[in-house]
Image (cartoon, grey):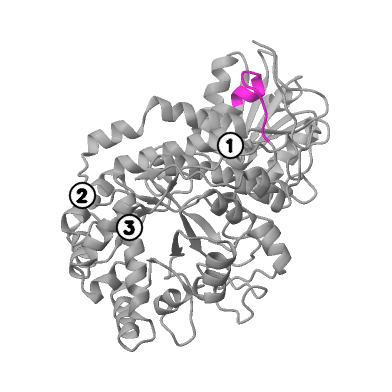
Amino acid sequence: MTIRNLIAVSLITLLAACHSKGTAHAADDGAGQQTIEPYATIAITPEALQWADSVMEGLTAEEQIAQLFVPRLDITSDADGYARIKEMLSTYGMGGLLFGKGSLDTYVKLLNHARKVAAVPPMITFDGEWGLAMRIPDSPRFPYAMALGATRSQPLMEAYGREVARECRILGIHVNFAPDLDVNSNPANPVIGFRSLGGDAENVGLLGAAYCIGMADGDVMPVGKHFPGHGDTSVDSHHALPTVDHSVERLTDYDMMPFSICIRAGMPAVMVGHLRVPALDPSGTPASLSPVITTKWLRDSLKFNGLIFTDALAMKGARADDTNNCVSALLAGADILLGSGAPVADFKAVKAAVATGIIPADTITARCRRVLAYKYSLGCQRNQQLELQAVSQQLNSPACSKLIDSLCTASVTLLSDRMQMLPIKSDTSTVVVIGNDAEAFVTAYREYSPQSKFFTLGKASKITAPLRRALLTPEVTVVVTSAQPWAVSAYKSILEVNSGICTVFMFNAYKLTSFPVNEEGATMITYDCFPAMCRAAARAVLGYSPITGRMPVDVPSRAHIMQGITLIPPAR
């Protein structure tokens, strides 16, 4: 159930408290931020508490513990897969599931099975930062967060959140582990990068909040992650424990700003990361296992009263000295233990900790009641059985395709155009693709300009005589989809022939540093490369759509945050 939560503090006041940067008007710095209204949120209602209490009357102390576990299971549509689901949900009565990567067909079968065997209605969770396609390849694909950050469009982000919620509901998914609220300030970050909305904390917070508006209005729980901020790390917490060595002031004014914005606006859930943050907890305990960070900072300082998830506890960053990390996470203040390394053994460890008084019994009761109340608010009690053909047809709607096109179009960013090359006007221009995956660009370009010449440079390709002649024509567009050394070398060779070209880079913005600067021509970036983005890039180059994107991150020696040129082409 979704209710309208009209909070008293407007976001204008909130942004002032969060050190708003104000409005920029320069052409290459982007337009200023809009404000955003407080939004409808997933909330605990009296009816939800009544339902939770009725369920708890039938649960033993052990079963209350089990409700706090949401194990991650690999997608296997076989006897072992079905037996594993039954063990988790029926034998042990665990609270929900997080499935890994798999086909739509397998998802439908396993989700139907999960609902049939669950002792208590399960909470189905999903890790879909760029939509269902992040885990289910045969579903709609949305742009990476870095591209979305370039749009600076709260209405589009709200529409995006609402569409993802619609798709989740079609599959009976209740929780989506998005948005990523990490402010990515480290170009060498090995795990966040394009998953972040960018390096401007205010922009990340506002776009993240807008995404949550749509998600919550669609009756799916958004989960902001990874508190208190994974953006400035050089270690992947899947493999080791990263350190965020920022001062308290830097953390509160920068890393935690997006969380503060979203929490004050009503975000219902937060995921705590496996991060060592000495300024907040000098002991070096991972944030997910730290009472200081999870309770003192998140609950008390930021006044968060929603649901707290751990990041996956099987990750190597979630290590507790001589203590089971699920026990530590509960003592730290977590409500839901996500993806533990050994769910059955971890359940028994928590059970033992409760029996010996390490974890107070009333802590389990309170957390279980909160989890069950949110289950009701999310509609987990409705036993939805799925039919594959209907699910597939509903997911791939015309409205969804139109939204994806709009997001891609708004993300295209023109970094420079000193010769005012764009839009390309000639019907006999030249297009060179360096790399793969740009077939949709060529197809779209050819549709608008069928007389143009098209070339592809692969790993072993050389600049042939026909290509050299084509490169010397007045209007040349080079599309780069790879940042491998051979691609860099091919690009340098092209610049040696003609430095006045339009370049379209279709990858993570941080990879720009591998390429020489195109001083004389135009430089465009899309941050991502898939068919809808390819089509948007072709339309932008040829002047069939406006260019309004802004660089969402700092790229040393190449581009700064919010750099970009607005280009509104004349009607064609």
The answer to whether residue 299 is left or right of residue 496 is: left
Q: Earlier in the sequence, mark 1 or mark 2?
A: 2
Q: Determine crowd level at label 1: few under 14, some 14-19, many 20+ residues with C-alpha closer than 10 A.
A: many
Label of residue 492 in the image:
none
Location of residue 371 with respect to 517 vertically, above or below: below
Q: What residue type is labelled 3?
A: Ala
Q: Earlier in the sequence, mark 3 or mark 2?
A: 2
> What is the C-alpha distance between the residues marked 3 and 2?
23 Å
Residue 310 percent across, percent down from the top left: 45, 66
Question: Residue shown at 70%/33% (left/top)?
Answer: 503
Residue 140 shows up from this direction:
yes
Q: Mark 3 points at which residue?
A: 373
Q: Which of 107 and 70 is in front in this view?
A: 70
Place residue 243 in its image quadrant: bottom right
Q: Name the residue under label 2.
A: 112
Q: Earlier in the sequence, mark 1 or mark 3?
A: 1
Q: Which amino acid does label 2 sit on?
A: Asn
The answer to whether residue 493 is left or right of residue 209 is: right
Q: Is mark 2 on a helix, strand or loop?
A: helix
Instruction: Magenta stretch: give its range.
Output: 538-549
Q: Determine crowd level at label 3: few under 14, some 14-19, many 20+ residues with C-alpha closer than 10 A.
A: many
Label of residue 154 in the image:
1
Mark toward the viewer: 1 or 2: 1
Question: Residue shown at 37%/38% (left/top)?
Answer: 166
> Is 135 one of the magenta-colored residues?
no
Q: Is mark 1 on a helix, strand or loop?
A: helix
Residue 189 percent across, percent down from the top left: 63, 60
Question: Residue shown at 43%/66% (left/top)?
Answer: 312
Location of residue 121 with respect to 25 vertically, above or below: below
Question: Residue shown at 44%/28% (left/top)?
Answer: 401
Q: What residue type is labelled 1?
A: Gln
